[in-house]
Amino acid sequence: MISREPLLNVGILEGSEHVTGRLEGAFRDRDGSVVSGAFNAQVAEGRMSVVLEDGVHRYSGQEVVFAPADSHGAVRLNDVTIGVQFHWERKEQQVFRGALRLLDRQGTGITAINQIPLEEYLASVISSEMSANAPAALLRAHAITSRSWLVAMLERARRQAPPPYNRTPLNETTTAVVAWYTREDHTDFDVCADDHCQRYQGITKIISKSVEQAMRATRGQFLVFDDEVCDARFFKACGGRTEEFGSAWEPVDVPYLRSVSDAPGDLPPVRTEEEMNRWIATPPAAYCNTTDAEILKQVLPSFDQETTDFFRWTVRYSAEELSALVCRKSGIDFGLIRQIEPVHRGPSGRITSLRLVGEKRTVTVGKELEIRRWLSPSHLYSSAFIVQTVDDEAGNAKEFILKGAGWGHGVGLCQIGAAVMSTKGMTAEDIVLHYFKGATLRTLY
């Protein structure tokens, strides 16, 4: 297992034709010269060029690196996209400590990478994922969870394990599509800065004294199971019960990523359509079932607070709207969709296999993220939904109503549930060991 703090390569921008920003403070280039000021990087004639505002310092090649000459240096990057393909997607100017690496491997686009020690990276993740003024127990629980997930991923890469990725190829005779996605999609850096991995915005978000204290209190602390660092996943809200690992990713049993009740008492698994209808209609008294604005502000950044109907939610599509959407998102022409049929659910009620019946094609799709992608311009909150069909006078579907529960894949730590637990006096250890059953806490560096 890990025994010292690693240095991370965090992907901020990828495949950009043009990257601009500013080196604030003193930085050293590849020749050891001290430089600063605005920079302009672009790909021209298949080659990357980087020019500083003084017009004197010019660089080209596949990689250009600017390393801070002291602890005061910061990199300001323009037009950083956050919430990629989600409903809150937008561009921001962001500021980062550490080194800046600009890569262009094939002359097709620039990748901007922030190189930074793990603990400093995590301080930003905690502040980016939630309010820096959240309760200490919540900040500490999230620090332990995020640190564990990240190092488990690095350890897997170090062992050169094959990427646990799968997607069924599409053709005219495809009847089933199964897909799952992990951070192994990245090749030039360890982890990306968006929700695909962990939300990271450098020092753009204020890193408060409480976050610094949480990082110091948990430094080097990990969730461990069977002498390995836990692959500790997290998400926004489970909807009442968390999901098991195999519903979202590889079809394997991960003992500490099983479905647990998000409540002091037991909320039973939800698997049948009858049980799911009751689950949606009569929301349980779960930890994440809260509308308390003060609690939500602790765990939801301002753009996540733009919608608060995440515990139970409703989406409506006309048959024509849904058919056009699914054709665009899946690449399959179903014709007019007639039926949407859940085939299999996990214990949280999340659909892992869904059958779409159209005039031209019938295809079954899974797993949960692929279902969410097909049925929304960005992503549905979750795949834990029931389908209500409104027919026209001829008995054909004219409208589909999706009524759902929760926000995210549902595996691991429920952020909003953890926030509520922290307000009830539970410790960080109470929180993480509730969501990651069978794991233990261990300080490794």
Image (spheres, rainbow, N blue to C red):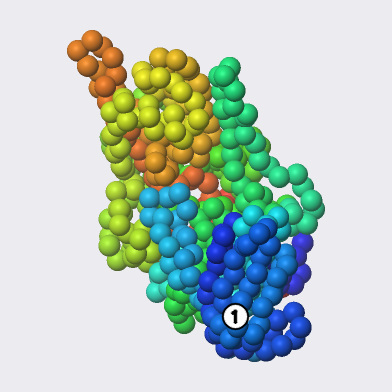
Whole-percent x, y for residue 149 in the image: 62, 57
Q: How dense is the environment of label 1, judged by Cα within 10 Å: few (below 14), some, or many (20 and up)?
A: many
Residue 297's quadrant in the figure?
bottom left
What residue is drawn where x is 39% and y is 33%? 325
Q: What element carries label 1?
A: strand
From the viewer's perspective, tell me whether residue 128 is left or right of residue 121.
left
What residue is drawn where x is 40% and y is 19%? 335
From the viewer's perspective, tell me whether residue 241 is left or right of residue 315.
right
**Residue nearest the observer in this picture, 209 or 80:** 80
327 vs 406: above or below = above
What residue is drawn where x is 71% and y is 58%? 105
Whole-percent x, y for residue 241 in the image: 44, 43
418 vs 36: above or below = above
Which quadrant is home to the C terminus? bottom right
Residue 130's quadrant in the figure?
bottom left
From the viewer's perspective, tell me whether residue 279 is left or right of residue 104.
left
Q: Residue furthest front?
A: 45
Whole-percent x, y for residue 331 in the image: 50, 30
What residue is drawn where x is 56% and y is 23%? 176
Numbered label tally: 1
Which quadrant is home to the N terminus? bottom right
**Residue nearest the observer in this picture, 315 or 80:** 80
**Residue nearest the observer in this picture, 120 or 18:** 18
Q: Residue furthest top?
A: 394
* Residue 91 appears in the rendering: yes
Whole-percent x, y for residue 18 in the image: 55, 64
430 vs 163: above or below = below
Q: Residue furthest right?
A: 159
* Residue 240 appears in the rendering: no
**Residue nearest the observer in this picture, 17 or 436:** 17
Residue type marked 1: Leu
Which residue is tagged 1? 52
